[in-house]
Image: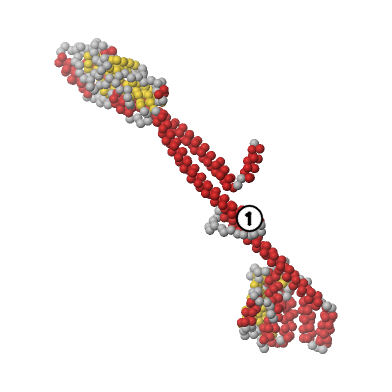
Amino acid sequence: MKRLTAWAKRTAAGMPFAAKCFLLLFLGVLVPLAAQSAVFRWHTEESVNRELMNKLDEELQDDADKFAAVLGELTTIAAEYRQNETLYRYLDQEYSKDLEVMVRYQDDLYGLFTGNVLFPKEIRSICVYTNNDGLFNSAFVRKEEDVSDGSFGRTLLYRNVQPVAGKPSMLLQSSFAETRASLYEGDRFLSLLVTLDYYRQYARYDKLMAIEVDLDYISSVLNEGKLFSNIVMTDSEGAVLAAAHGYGGGISYFSPEDEPLSGMQVMEKQIGAFPLTLYGVCDPEIFADEFDEGRVLSIGISAVCLLVCCAFILTLTRSINRRLGSLVRQAGEIARGRFVTTKAREGGRDEFDVLQNSINAMSVQLKTLIEEGYQAEIARMELEKETNQAKLLSLQAQVNPHFMFNALESIRLRALAKGERETAGVIKHMARMFRNLIEWDRNVITLREELGFLDEFLFIQRYRFEDEFSYEIDVSEEAYDCLLPKMILQPLVENACVHGVGAVAEDRWVGIRAQTDGKALEIRVEDNGGGMPPEKLAELRSMLSGDARAGRSVGVWNVYRRLALSYGDAFSFRIDSTPGRGTVCAVRIPMKKEDASCTP
């Protein structure tokens, strides 16, 4: 078993997907469906056959019960006549005159048989036989020398007399006559014989009542059956008394043992307590032909279903194989470094569409990550280069810095000694600003630190313009702790002071505003200077979009480049200016707090 399992795994591993689908179709669909169809047909035929046999048994039992009820009704009628004393007096009396016989017949006997009793249609005739020679033969009474032989004036070829169970003085006689006794009689008879011996005082003559059963009616009832090929009623000796088909003329016998030899199937039912039997004969070939027709129809329907199923599965397999092949080829291209994408189906939402969209997204993302990695590396190298240059300049500026600070401190003390406190204050702020420029130990600082440096610069600018200059700093509380690259605001404020308000004679004003929206930090530097002409503004905007290099606006260009190297595409830098009204520089960068890292 292990070897077989291992062989199956190796074979399955080496099979292409299309072959696996065909194998799955054959083993998982065709074989089970064919087996299910065969089992279903077998089970259906067995169920139908059982149901058919039950219906045959029910039909034969219904006929047997019907005939038993008919014969039971006849025994009831016979019992009533057997206990009728008027009938006994008429049959046992000695008559001296023929007129007396006729009067008694008309007054008593005729009314007894025609007046109050309604005979059922199953009765062919009722007649009383006696050896009283004083009576006349009539419709209901006949003279017989020997009433016990049961011939009743006929020449019998066959006679079978059997007692009726539970009915004393009653016999059931089946007989065949040599010739027809009349035009309305056949050659076979079924009679209920009743010995009239109920009253012992009327025993002078023998008396016997015979009730003839209408066998033609019995045959018509048997002919109503739809399931049997033939239904036969026989007596205890097997002589056929009535049949749905055939057995007409002469004595015929039915043997259930001979029917199977001719391929027929026989069912048997006893007719109540009477010595009669019903045999139902059916032809299995008829049912077999019907089963064959049903089998052919079932096989045809199964074949059509299989063909439709195969066509559908083949179509689906071909579609899956084609789409899977496309995914395999795309994966191979990606593995070779060519990040291609394939066109997805419109409105497709199955697993292959999801997988194809995922592979496309992965291909695009890999390409983007690789390109961004290259670009980030280039940006990092440029930022490192510019930072190193700034540090080099800082080192060059630090040549004997103590000498410079000591010199500025000596000048400040000298100005204080002469009482020039304002000049001394300016020199102090200049020394602080100079120290902040040369101490470049961090590339990223908080806005609070940047504004502290601007305070030194703006103090000097206010000294420069005397009382004709003012500035305003409006910063939200949350913005103070936001991080930004060092020395980003000073060039913008310097431009506002030198090129902006420097062009007006009075009421010079510079504003610095900063606020956050939860995601970004927005800083605005504005002035009320002379503004820029449209061509100068267009030149600056072209420089910021990368279409031109920096000319005289080196400070603005450096700010833009440092922001681009630090934030990539995640920042915005906008300049708006109106001649005669002033200029606004707006910078928007990602919001990062003091406890977060900022990419330099």
Give the quarter of the figure containing the C terminus: bottom right
Q: Which residue is mark 1?
A: 331
469 up-or-down from 142: above or below: below
Residue 470 visible in the current orientation? no
Q: Amino acid at mark 1?
A: Ala
Residue 357 visible in the current orientation? yes
Residue closer to the observer: 473 or 106: 473
**Where is residue 233 shown, x and y percent of the image?**
34, 23
The residue located at (35%, 19%) in the rendering is 253
The part of the image, by quadrant, that contains residue 217 is top left
* Left or right side of 197 for 575: right
* Left or right side of 455 for 538: left
**Where is residue 522 shown, x and y percent of the image?**
65, 73
381 up-or-down from 83: above or below: below
The residue located at (73%, 86%) in the rendering is 464
The part of the image, by quadrant, that contains residue 576 is bottom right
The residue located at (58%, 45%) in the rendering is 19
Give the quarter of the figure containing the N terminus: top right
